[in-house]
């Protein structure tokens, strides 16, 4: 069953975050019957995007699925969602106002999708103070080319360097996310709420098993009167 997390905000509202698992089925935006699976996790038509490993942030639209890697909304009750199968799904929440979700793989991390999402929230009047990071591939399973790893270390910081369980060079996406959020943007409340998609039960993995399915992270604002 999807795991539900709740974040209370200073304006009295609550943000609900649902993270699906393998048993919930496939949440790829093109999968047959995905609308019904979404409704069983969080009511209302979801606003999703066609992810391209870039930095664009889309305004929530429950009808269209624009090319972007983050979604923002201030509409109460409107679910926004991203999908993953090794890349990290991330929910960014401020004390009031809009919320956002982002899809963060190594390309997006390097390009600055977290920075663009934080900026989009700030432009709407609220910076994120709480961030939930869902399941992603862990460094123990994420062998990475040495040259690309050094380039990312130069861009993000040395925290991204790691080794696999076999002792080969690895990328630590979670460490890179923490560096961007905590060290560069001063967000202290960063909650890592997912396990490795490649070696833990419950998640889909493109890299480890070439699975085409996706799990999802969906978030919505629940009004104070409905919380």
Image (tube, rainbow, N blue to C red):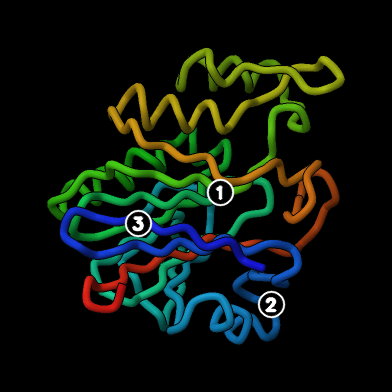
Which tag is nearer the camera, tag 1 or tag 3? 1
Q: Which quadrant: the N terminus?
A: bottom right
Q: Nearer the viewer, residue 117 or 129?
A: 129
Specify few, some or many for label 1: CA neighbours under 10 Å numbering under 14, 14-19, or 20 or more.
many
SS at mark 3 in the image: strand
Q: CA distance from mark 3 to mark 2?
A: 23 Å
Tell me the tag on residue 31. Answer: 2
Residue of label 1: 134
Q: Of the residues under marks 1 and 2, which one precedes in the sequence?
A: 2
- Can you tell which quarter of the image residue 19 is in? bottom right
Task: State left or right for residue 53 relative to residue 63.
Answer: right
Q: Position of residue 206 (x, y in %)?
A: 76, 51
Which tag is nearer the camera, tag 3 or tag 2? 3
> Which residue sits at x=20%, y=62%?
12
Tell me the tag on residue 166. Answer: none
Q: Of the residues under marks 1 and 3, which one precedes in the sequence?
A: 3
Specify few, some or many for label 3: CA neighbours under 10 Å numbering under 14, 14-19, or 20 or more.
many
Residue of label 3: 100
Q: CA distance from mark 1 to mark 2?
A: 21 Å
Task: State left or right for residue 99 relative to residue 139.
Answer: left
Q: Of the residues under marks 3 and 2, which one precedes in the sequence?
A: 2
């Amino acid at each position: 069953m999807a795991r539900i997390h709740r974040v209370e905000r200073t304006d009295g509202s609550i943000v609900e975050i649902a993270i699906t698992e393998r048993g919930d089925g496939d949440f790829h935006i093109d999968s047959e019957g995905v609308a019904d699976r979404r409704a069983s996790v969080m009511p209302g038509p979801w606003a999703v995007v066609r992810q391209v490993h870039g930095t664009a942030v889309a305004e929530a639209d429950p009808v269209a699925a624009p090319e972007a890697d983050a979604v923002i909304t201030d509409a109460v009750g409107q679910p926004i969602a991203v999908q993953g199968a090794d890349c990290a799904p991330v929910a960014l929440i401020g004390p009031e106002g809009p919320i956002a979700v982002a899809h963060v793989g190594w390309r997006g991390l390097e390009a600055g999708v977290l920075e663009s999402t934080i900026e989009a929230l700030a432009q709407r009047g609220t910076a994120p103070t709480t961030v939930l990071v869902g399941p992603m591939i862990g460094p123990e399973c994420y062998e990475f080319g040495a040259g690309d790893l050094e380039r990312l270390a130069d861009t993000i910081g040395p925290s991204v360097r790691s080794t696999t369980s076999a002792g080969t060079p690895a990328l630590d996406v979670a460490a890179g996310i923490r560096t961007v959020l905590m060290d560069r943007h001063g967000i202290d409340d960063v909650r890592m709420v997912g396990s490795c998609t490649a070696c833990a039960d419950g998640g889909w993995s493109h890299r480890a098993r070439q699975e085409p399915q996706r799990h999802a992270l969906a978030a919505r604002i629940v009004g104070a009167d409905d919380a």
